[in-house]
Image: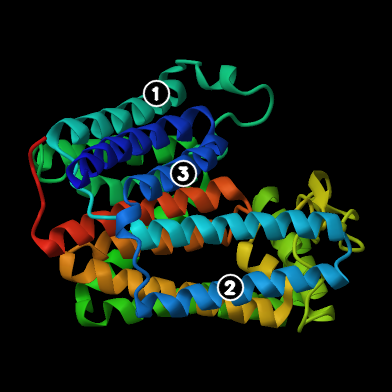
Amino acid sequence: MIENARIYGNVFTVVVFAGSFAAAVLSPQAIAPLVMLYAVGIAVLNWRNFRLARKGLLPIGLAAALLAWAFASVLWSLDPGLSLERTFRLFLMIALAAVVAIVLPGIRVGKRGVLIIAGAIFCASGLIVMDAAIGFSIGPHLKEGGDPYDRTGPLLVLLLLPTITLIDGRFGRKVSVALVALSVAAVLLLSNKASVLALVLGLGAWIVYMALRRFGPHLVVAAILVFTVAQPLGLAVIHNDLREWSLSTTVDAGIRHRAFIWAFSAEKAVEKPVMGWGIGTSRSIPGGDTSAVFLRPDGTVEGEGESLPLHPHNAFLQVFLEMGLIGMVLVAATLSVAAYRFARLLQPAGLLGPGIAFIVSALTISSISFGAWQGWWVSAQLLVVALLSGLARTRVSGRDDQED
């Protein structure tokens, strides 16, 4: 029974991770149900492994406190119905993470499975390269209007470096380098600024870790605190200057609009700094529908945009805006404790380098592009955490199986 669970679990892992690269190109939102299916499947296959260790009580307790605070914010929310929906989404995120963390065994993917995942990386990246470089023209047919690959770049950055640890050593370093090069080329050709910045900062964090290995888990916590606490508070301090800069600078209109959104969101967060406006209420904030006009040096209009369209495009500023300082502290504490445990698991397995690259990349993109409660984005992060955690448990236990 246990051996069958291990075999099915490994097959399931291969299918889900190969499918995640297909989803990154075809439909990023599909990652959310894919990860939900993975979490439920892993739980069913490994229910005998359900053991909640004492060290797991603290992050789960903090997450429960965060969920309770989110539910309480419904009482003063501008849109109680939407707040309840966002609270339920937060519950699902926490539940999925807890299930995977408690029951996930070691991941031992054989050569055939690794070949399938490598093939998925090659196909996804190759399609983008052909589409962007030589006019293969598949992408525009996948989505009517807008950028068909708007979310593909961030997902590739998130999935690529940690996933490549599966491939490295299985087919030789040349294959690994070739796949990384192809995928990086795909990210660059997509011209997504957040993806490129995340890739650079993620690799930079990996290099810093290589120089300061003994402080690895502490570096992870420091990164979490910088993004979840220092960043939103810093934006709150400079929001007036940031607004003036966004209206006067001559940089790209998209960057100016994003800075203007952050300035407005930070200003509104300061109005209710302790309790916030209620989870999920960014789109209902008073004044959020007013528009700003961004001019070129010659006085002509380059672009315009709302003060707060849907969400602040910064997950951690959104937490401050909607859940106040209390919510921000709970998020920071939950992520810090969980990330520290994660880093302690990866370090002896030699996986903390790609782990830190993944964490910093995810924090960067979350601070630039997406909302705090977007399930597909959180699900993608959970998927990578599951991969690295399973590989680390296998390596530490000395049960790394290279064969099918």
Q: Amino acid at mark 1?
A: Leu
Whether residue 75 appears in this view of the structure is yes
Write the residue at 71% across / 56% down: 86
In what element is the residue under mark 3? helix
Residue 74 versus residue 139 in the image, above or below: below
In what element is the residue under mark 1? helix
Observer-nearest of 90 and 224: 90
Write the residue at 81% across / 49% down: 305
Left or right: residue 179 compared with residue 380: left
Answer with the quarter of the image where residue 94 lies: bottom right
Q: Amino acid at mark 3?
A: Val
**Label at residue 35:** 3
State the separation of the CA atoms marked 2 and 1.
42 Å
Left or right: residue 312 compared with residue 11: right
Q: Which residue is mark 1?
A: 127
In what element is the residue under mark 2? helix
Q: How far from the left and from the top, in percent, is residue 140?
A: 58, 20
Q: Nearer the viewer, mark 1 or mark 3?
A: 3
Write the residue at 59% across / 78% down: 330
State the separation of the CA atoms marked 3 and 2.
21 Å
Q: Which residue is mark 2?
A: 64
Q: Could you tell me if the residues under marks 2 and 1 are in contact, i.e. CB atoms within 8 Å?
A: no
Q: Quadrant of the N terminus?
A: top left
Q: How far from the left and from the top, in percent, is residue 64?
A: 58, 73
